[in-house]
Image (cartoon, grey):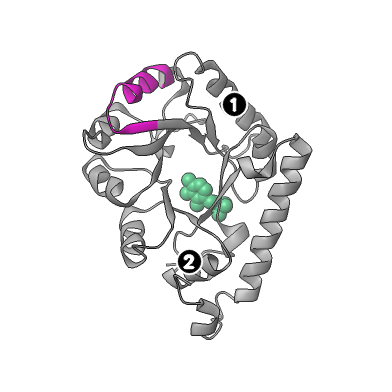
Amino acid sequence: MALPDAAAAEPASSMTQPSDLASRLQTVRGGVADAARAAGRDPADITTIAITKFHPVSLIEELYALGVRNLGENRHQEAQAKAAELAGQDLVWHFVGQIQGKKARQVRAYANVIHSIDRESLVTALGSEDSSVDCFIQVNLTDDAARGGVDPANLTALVDNVLATPGLRLLGLMAVAPLGVEPRRAFAHVRELSERLRGQAPAATALSMGMSQDYAAAVLEGATHLRIGTAITGNRPVL
Ligand SMILES: *Cc1c(COP(=O)(O)O)cnc(C)c1O
């Protein structure tokens, strides 16, 4: 066993009862399988990423013992510290938060997949002649530029920019469904954007979309990567 069994190593904390974690995880796995079946899709084509932001490494160890290998974080310093503490484990680290240009190289050093490419300066900062990193371009479905993501009107140019930059392997598009919009409509929009890119970027077919509240709708619209936090981890601790 690569990691200690956290349930055995530690008394159950009041914050996260391991049995609750296991049952929430099982519920999500069942929900993903049900949604895949409803969509006529193979659940094996869908990667569920457990978003562990704000939670301690001990929770990641519990998830590991339950078979979780794909983890997501959205804050660089926290992600960097967790990845360092768990270095050498067979984990796949997904970075899903906004990235400051001056931190881009550091994020690249531990992230296996970067979901939040949204501007050309970031593409330049993440490029490399020496190694390749998987990435998604994040699309902003709101009118609020502060939310992160590229305006769909500028997507084609950004895709060209990523494709022309060594060291970035474009998997597809990422998005967050905006508040106040039917999630399925938002995800259908992302799927349409993705289909329009087929000629330009034939390999970039993945779709990172769907969170705790809306992952079933995302699966119906073709999501390949679900980013699920609280439905698995329980409520995030308040820091
Ligand atoms: C926190 C976060 C999630 C997970 O959100 P939940 O509602 O807890 O499932 C997914 N994607 C991004 C970009 C996030 O920051």
Which amino acid, mark 2? Ile
Q: Which mark is residue 94?
A: none
Residue at the location (48% across, 29% down)? 143
Q: Is residue 162 above or below residue 239?
A: above
Residue at the bottom extreme?
11
Find the magenta span and give its range.
155-169
Q: Is residue 15 visible?
A: yes
Q: Main secondary structure of the magenta part?
A: helix
- Numbered disc 1: secondary structure: helix
Percent of width and height locating residue 152: 47, 22
The x and y percentages for residue 117 are 37, 34
Q: Assess disc 2: are there few (<14), some (14-19) or many (≥20) residues with their C-alpha within 10 Å of its C-alpha.
A: many
Q: Residue at x 52, y 64 (%)?
A: 236
**For the point 48% across and 60% down, which residue is it?**
52
Please report whichever mark, 2 or 1, sits nearer to the chain's N-terminal start.
2
Point out which mark residue 60 bears: 2
User: Is label 2 or label 1 in front?
Assistant: 2
Q: CA distance from mark 2 to mark 1?
A: 31 Å
Q: Which residue carries the number 1 mark?
A: 191
Q: Measuring from the top left, give residue 113's x and y in whole percent.
A: 40, 43
Secondary structure at numbered mark 2 = helix
